[in-house]
Image (tube, helix red, strand yellow):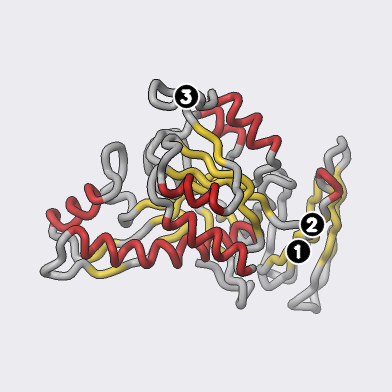
Amino acid sequence: MEAQCSLSRFCPNLSIPLVRSPKHPILLKCPSYSSRSSFVRTNHSTSSSVWFKETIACRKNCEIVASASLEGDVSRTVIRKKKLAVFVSGGGSNFRSIHEASVEGSIHGEIGVVVTNKSGCGGAEYARSKNIPVILFPKTKDEPHGLSASDLVATLRSFEIDFILLAGYLKLIPLELIQAYSKSIINIHPSLLPAFGGKGYYGMKVHKAVIASGARFSGPTIHLVDEHFDTGKILAQRVVPVLANDAAEDLAARVLKEEHRLYVEVVAALCDDRIVWREDGVPLIQSKDKPGEFY
């Protein structure tokens, strides 16, 4: 399998074609922030696991080491932690799980700022209790101090944010922000997308619809964010059963428990640069313990 490995926002044009056959060369292209690019090319017909390393000088002198092998696995070591922005509209239980994991060290990243459309929501209150800055977005009649889309992008840049995590944020993300953080915004939805997704499907409405449909399974989906509701490429899912006597609240509790686990796993992979892009544009997660496996 030839895979495109994303080094996220640090080196967005990095291309690492991986060729399994030892008869073909491996090309490692490491573009710098000047007009020059450096290449490492080799032909090794006798080795089944030959590694190549190229150090890339990125902004703020952060070094990333990319390694590719004939076995098709890729490893990278990023010196500094990723900086995360979390968007919330409600209680923020997923935000809390991610924050706790980052503090404990299972996520190699730190939450630099929280964005909310409701200044008094539980997620915003939790952020303030942890001394995490809170930003209001968008500007509305109820929240006159909210930022515009362009000001939000500029503010996130000032915090040097690498990834944006939507955790129960109910507003549509503006195109300006999506373009500024391409492939760097993810959302969690409480159903197995593409089923029971789109405008109007949120919270308990999702679980009621799942039960009413007669579906036997549900579960959370984490996906990349595009300009529409719940239509971005799926990154990860977790399946839970829908029981015969479930009320919406029962199903919601079962799904939420898996949301907390899944979101932490995906954010950890994101911060470790373990998101790998298949040729058809589908994102896969590289196993941390078994780098040659993807899911």
Nearest to viewer (mark 3 / mark 2): 3
Residue 199's x, y, as percent? 30, 37
Q: Residue at x 49, y 52 (%)?
A: 126
Closer to the chain start, of discs 3 and 2, is 2
Tell me if residue 137 comes above or below residue 58 in the rendering: above
Tell me the tag on residue 77. 1
Closer to the chain start, of discs 1 and 3, is 1
Q: Residue at x 55, y 36 (%)?
A: 135
Figure quadrant of residue 191: bottom left
Name the foreground residue: 213 vs 260.
Answer: 260
Name the foreground residue: 136 vs 183.
Answer: 136
Residue type for callout 2: Ile
Dot 1: element: strand
Residue type for callout 1: Thr
Nearest to viewer (mark 1 / mark 3): 3
Dot 2: element: strand
Q: Is residue 184 among the parts visible in the rendering? A: no
What is the crowding at mark 3: few (fewer than 14 residues within 10 Å), some, or many (at least 20)?
some
Tell me if residue 46 comes above or below residue 258 in the rendering: below
Q: Residue at x 47, y 28 (%)?
A: 138
Tell me if residue 66 comes above or below residue 177 in the rendering: below
Q: CA distance from mark 2 to mark 1?
A: 6 Å
Residue type for callout 3: Lys
Q: Residue under circle 3?
A: 139
Figure quadrant of residue 4: bottom right
Q: Is residue 4 left or right of residue 254?
A: right
Q: Residue under circle 2?
A: 64
